Image: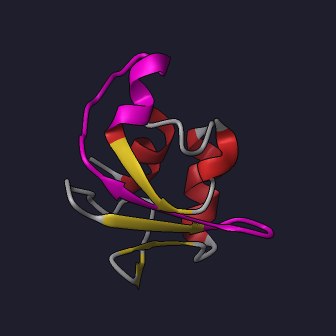
């Protein structure tokens, strides 16, 4: 699955266009390498996203084309970053 689509489907980023822009500006890395929006993601990859004043680091544990909002959080595990959402 494409990186920009994964970020949208997993609801890490709300819109695919925003996910694409984040990738194009070099704010998203996969396993330590800057990633393009079309980069394929697979299970066990580590995604790191730099937001304005924080960094989110997550491990991909599941890839699915369509998921419901309640199940989207089960697609990844947060390693560091936005853990205080709950």
Looking at the image, which is closer to me, 46 or 77?
77
Image coordinates for residue 14, horizontal then vertical, percent: 62, 37
The structure residue drawn at horizontal position 39% and vertical position 55%, both measured from the top left corner, is 3
Q: Is residue 56 magenta?
A: yes
Image coordinates for residue 17, horizontal then vertical, percent: 61, 45
Give the answer, above or below, for where 52 lies relative to 18.
below
Looking at the image, which is closer to me, 60 or 38?
60
Looking at the image, which is closer to me, 51 or 82?
82
The structure residue drawn at horizontal position 39% and vertical position 83%, both measured from the top left corner, is 32
Magenta part of the protein: which range? 50-74
The structure residue drawn at horizontal position 56% and vertical position 55%, both measured from the top left corner, is 20
Q: Is residue 20 magenta?
A: no
Quadrant position of residue 6:
top left
Check the image and name the residue furthest to the bottom: 33
Q: Give left or right: position of 14 versus 9.
A: right
Check the image and name the residue furthest to the left: 43
Give the answer, above or below, for where 5 lies relative to 22.
above
Q: Give left or right: position of 63 versus 18.
A: left
Give the answer, above or below, for where 80 lies relative to 73.
below
Give the answer, above or below, for where 66 lies relative to 59.
above
């Amino acid at each position: 699955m494409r990186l920009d689509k994964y970020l949208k489907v997993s609801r890490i980023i709300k819109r695919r266009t925003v996910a694409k822009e984040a990738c194009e500006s070099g704010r998203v890395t996969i396993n330590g390498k800057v990633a393009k929006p079309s980069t394929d993601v697979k299970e066990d990859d580590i995604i790191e996203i730099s937001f304005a004043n924080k960094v989110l680091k997550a491990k991909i544990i599941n890839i699915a084309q369509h998921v419901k909002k309640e199940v989207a959080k089960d697609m990844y595990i947060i390693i560091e970053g936005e853990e205080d959402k709950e």
